[in-house]
Image (cartoon, helix red, strand yellow):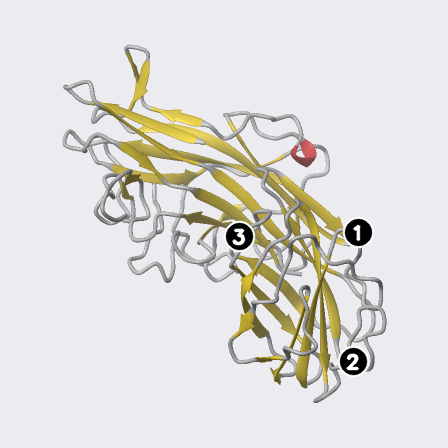
Amino acid sequence: MVSFRFVDKQKGYLVAAFALLVAFIAPSIVFAAQVTQRSVALSSSSAGADAVQYTIKFTPDSAAAEIVLDFCASTSSPLIGAECDEPAGFSVSSAAASGFTKDGTNSDVNTFIADGTITADVENTIVLTGVNNPDAAGPLYARILTYADGGSAAYDSETPGTHIDDGGVAMSITPTIGVSGAVLESMTFCVAGGSTAFSENCTGVATAPTLKLGADVGGVIALDSNNVYTGTVQTQISTNAVNGAIISLKSSTLGCGGLVRAGAASNAAGCGIAPATDTSNITQGQAKFGVRTGTAAGAGSNYNGALQPYDADGAGAGVAFYSSSVYRMGYVSGDATGVTSTYGDPILDTNSAPVNNMGMPLTFGASAANNTAAGLYSADLSLIATGKF
C-alpha cells in the first residue's frame, strides 16, 4: 500500500493509495506429442475473481479441428490421463472464446470443449472470457488437448481418447504479495517494501509494500509542491522458463493512468495527479506520478540471469520505456495498451532467458502542484509476472 498526503493553506489534505499485487503464470510439462511454447495469461490471479480473461497460447505439431481445455485443482496434476479434480469455485460454464464454437453438451464446469481451426507449427491463441477463478489460493492446472473433427465428444480426464497433441500448464491463484509455484517448470516472484533487497528465494524481507510519500508537516506525511517524494519496493524473480519472463505493471484507473480523486464524476475528471508519460523527469510542483527502475542484483551464491527494463524486441537492442533515470508511467489514452490495458504495461523482463534469484528495486515518485485539489486520490496497481516455456 502506498499513501500520499498533501496539506494546503486551509489545512485540507489528500491521500492516495495503491496496492501492489503479484501474479504469475507457469506452464507445465507433459508427455506424448506436445504442444510447445504454451502459456496462460490471466487478467486477474485473485482467488474468487469473476469474469476473468484467460489467454491461452500454444504451438501444436499438427492441425486439428477441436480443442479441450481441462482445468484441475491443486489436488490433481497437469498430466494427461490422470484424475482431474474440479477446483472449488472455478467455472468455465459461462465462458466463451472468439473464433471457436463451444460444445455446450460435453463441456462442464471445469472443462471447455470447442470446435475451431487449430493451425500446425504456428502460435495459436484462444482467449477465454467469463472465467471464474477458484475460491482458494494455490496452484491451478490446465490441460490442452487437440482432436480431429468429432474426436472430443467422448473426452474424460482419465480416458481422454484418441487425440492429436497435448500439453500441460501450471498457474497460481493467490491474494498475497509473494507467490510461488513449482510443477516441473517453475516460477517464484515476490514484492516487498523498503530499501533492503530480498535474500535468496524471496527470504529475509517481510515488509508489506506500504509507502508513505511526502514531508512531515506537524506529524502528517503530506505531498506538496516543494519536492518530488519517493518510496521504494523490492522485487525478485526466479524461473526456469526457456524463453524467460515479462513483468507488467497494471493500473485500475481507466481513463487516467495516474492517481484519481475520490468522488470525481469520472476517472478522467478526477485525474488530479497525472501519469508521467513524457521523456522529461518529474519536477517539484508538477502534479505527476511515475516509477523508475533500479539496478538489478543477485541474491545468494548461485544467482544468474538478467533482470532489466522491458526490452521491446527481446534481443537487447529495443528502446526501454522505463529506466533508472526518469519517472514514467506508460499510460495510453483509450486503455487498449499501457498500464490500464487488460494485461498492463511491460516494465521488466529477463532478457528472454531463465533467471535465478535476480531482484530489482522499483521507486515510485510523486509531487503535487499548488492548485492540486484536496481530496482522496488512489490507484490500484498490480505487478504481473508471465513466464513463457
Q: Nearer the viewer, residue 98 or 89?
A: 89
Specify the amino acid type for callout 3: Ser
Within 10 Å of disc 2 (Cα), the crowding (few <14, some 14-19, many 20+) is few
User: Which circle, 2 or 3, is nearer the viewer?
Assistant: 2
Identify the element where label 1 is drawn. Answer: loop
Residue 215's disc number: none
Residue 147 percent coordinates (x, y):
73, 82
The circle on residue 154 is 2
- Count all numbered tags in the image, as a single digit: 3
Q: In the structure shown, which secondary structural element does the residue marked by tag 3 occupy?
A: loop
In the image: residue 2, left or right of residue 170: left
Identify residue type, mark 2: Ala
Viewer-closest of 115 and 367: 115
Is label 1 in contact with label 3 (beta carbons under 8 Å)?
Answer: no
Which element is circle 2 on?
loop
The reply to whether dot 2 and dot 3 touch (C-beta < 8 Å) is: no
325 left or right of 86 in image = left
Q: Where 298 sits versus 196, above or below?
A: below
What whole-number distance in Å separates the C-alpha atoms at marks 1 and 3? 22 Å
* The one of 358 and 227 positioned closer to us in this rendering: 227
Q: Residue at the spot x=42%, y=42% of the render?
A: 380
Q: Which residue corresponds to mark 1?
A: 75
Q: Quadrant of the C terminus?
A: bottom right
Res. 201 image quadrant: top right
Q: Which residue is mark 3?
A: 44
